[in-house]
C-alpha cells in the first residue's frame, strides 16, 4: 500500500510549550483519514506541520516518499490543500474570486493573472458543490455554514492530491455535514485524492473514515478502523466521557454520550 504521508518521531513546540510528542504515523493513498481528540490536544498543529506552515524544513515528514523540505512551497501547494478551521476575510471579494484563489499555485508567475480556464475550474467546482448560486455574492455576506462550504470549493479548485480538512463540518447542519463528508469520500474514491480530516463528530468519523488516529496530549494514543478504536473504553480514556456504543447492520459503531452530572 502506497504511503502518501509518513511522519516519523515528529515533535513540535510553541516556544517552550511542547505540543506534539514523538508522532509517528503513515497515511495510505486513497483513504479518508480521521484525526480525533479533545480540544487543544494538537490536531490543528499536526495539520499545520504537515503543510509546512510551522516548520518548512521538517526532517520528520515525507510527502509521496520525498522529504518535506525538498519541496518548494509552490510544489507543495500543488499537492496539498487545506480547508482551515478558521478563516477570516478582510476584503469584500466575490465568492468566485475567492474560490479562484485556489488556482494561485498553478499560475506560471504570480504577476500573470488568472486565465479563463482558472475561472472555469473555480465555477465548475462551485457547481459540483451546489454553490454556484453564491458565485457573485460578496463572500463576507455568506452565512457561517455557506462560507465553510466555499472554503472546501477553494481547496478543491487547487486540484490537490492531499486534502487536509480542519473541522470542515463545524458550522454545518446535519444534512450539509453528511453531504460534505459524502462528497469528500466520493472524491477520494474517484479522483485519486487522500483526505485527512480533523473531526469532532465521532459518528461522522465512523460513517466516513477508513482509519482513525486518536490523539491524546500530543501523542497518537490509538489508531485503527472506526470499529477498532471507537470503543467505550478508548473514548473514556481519550475524552474522559462515558458513552454507549451501538452498531448498525454493517457493524459500524455509533456513539451515544452519557450525561456527566
Ligand atoms: N501560536 C501558538 N502559540 C502558542 N500556543 C499555541 C499556538 N497555537 C496553538 N497553541 C496551543 O497549542 C495547543 C494545541 O493547539 P491546536 O490548535 O493544535 O489544538 P487542537 O487539537 O486543534 O484543538 P481544537 O479541537 O480546539 O481545535 C493548544 O493548547 C493551543 O492553545
Ligand atoms: Mg484545531
Image (spheres, helix red, strand yellow):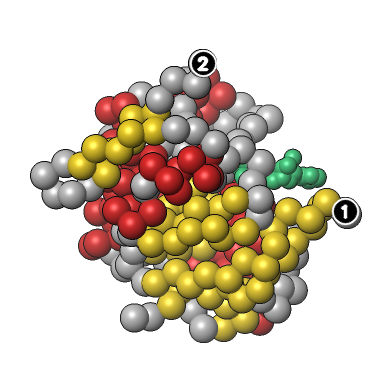
Residue designated by label 1: 15
Name the N-terminal-most of marks 2 and 1: 1
Q: In this view, does 217 lie to the left or right of 132?
A: right
Q: Any mark on residue 261, and which?
A: 2
- Is residue 210 something one can see in this rendering? yes
Left or right of residue 11: residue 211: left
Q: Is mark 1 within 8 Å of ligand 1?
A: yes
Q: How many marks?
A: 2
Residue at 73 percent across and 54 percent down: it is: 19
Mark 2, secondary structure of its residue: loop
Check residue 23 in the rendering and tell me which mark sits there, or answer none.
none
Q: Where is residue 189 in the image (x, y as percent from the top left)?
A: 24, 62
The residue nearer to you, when weighing 212 against 164, is 212
Q: Given contact means CB atoms under 8 Å apart, are the residues at marks 2 and 1 in contact? A: no
Rendered residue at 83%/51% (across/down): 17
**Residue 110 % position (x, y):** 65, 61
Label 2 – label 1 distance at C-alpha: 37 Å
Which residue corresponds to the image point at 16% horizontal and 41% vertical from the top-left? 248
- Taking 197 as reference, is 58 above or below it? below
Q: Judge left or right: residue 205 versus residue 41.
A: left
Amino acid at each position: 500500500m502506497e504511503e502518501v504521508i509518513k511522519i516519523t518521531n515528529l515533535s513540535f513546540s510553541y516556544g517552550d510549550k511542547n505540543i506534539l510528542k514523538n508522532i509517528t504515523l503513515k497515511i495510505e493513498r486513497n483513504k479518508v483519514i480521521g484525526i480525533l481528540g479533545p480540544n487543544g490536544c494538537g490536531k490543528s498543529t499536526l495539520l499545520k506541520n504537515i503543510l509546512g506552515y510551522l516548520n518548512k524544513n521538517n526532517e520528520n515528514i515525507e510527502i509521496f516518499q520525498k522529504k518535506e523540505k525538498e519541496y518548494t512551497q509552490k510544489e507543495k501547494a500543488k499537492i496539498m490543500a487545506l480547508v482551515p478551521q478558521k478563516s477570516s476575510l478582510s476584503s469584500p471579494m466575490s465568492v468566485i474570486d475567492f474560490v479562484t484563489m485556489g488556482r494561485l499555485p498553478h499560475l506560471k508567475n504570480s504577476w500573470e493573472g488568472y486565465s479563463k480556464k482558472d475561472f472555469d475550474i473555480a465555477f465548475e467546482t462551485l457547481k459540483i458543490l451546489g454553490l454556484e448560486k453564491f458565485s457573485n455574492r460578496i463572500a463576507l455576506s455568506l452565512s457561517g455554514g455557506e462560507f465553510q462550504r466555499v472554503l472546501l470549493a477553494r481547496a478543491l479548485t487547487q486540484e490537490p492530491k492531499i486534502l487536509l480538512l480542519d473541522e470542515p463540518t463545524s458550522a454545518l447542519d446535519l444534512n450539509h455535514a453528511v453531504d460534505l463528508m459524502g462528497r469528500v469520500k466520493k472524491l477520494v474514491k474517484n479522483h485519486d485524492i487522500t483526505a485527512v480530516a480533523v473531526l469532532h463528530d465521532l459518528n461522522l468519523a465512523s460513517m466516513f473514515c477508513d482509519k482513525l488516529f486518536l490523539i491524546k496530549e500530543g501523542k497518537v494514543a490509538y489508531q485503527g478502523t472506526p470499529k477498532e478504536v471507537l470503543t467505550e473504553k478508548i473514548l473514556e480514556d481519550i475524552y474522559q466521557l462515558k458513552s454507549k456504543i451501538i452498531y448498525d447492520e454493517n457493524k459500524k459503531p455509533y456513539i451515544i454520550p452519557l450525561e456527566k452530572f
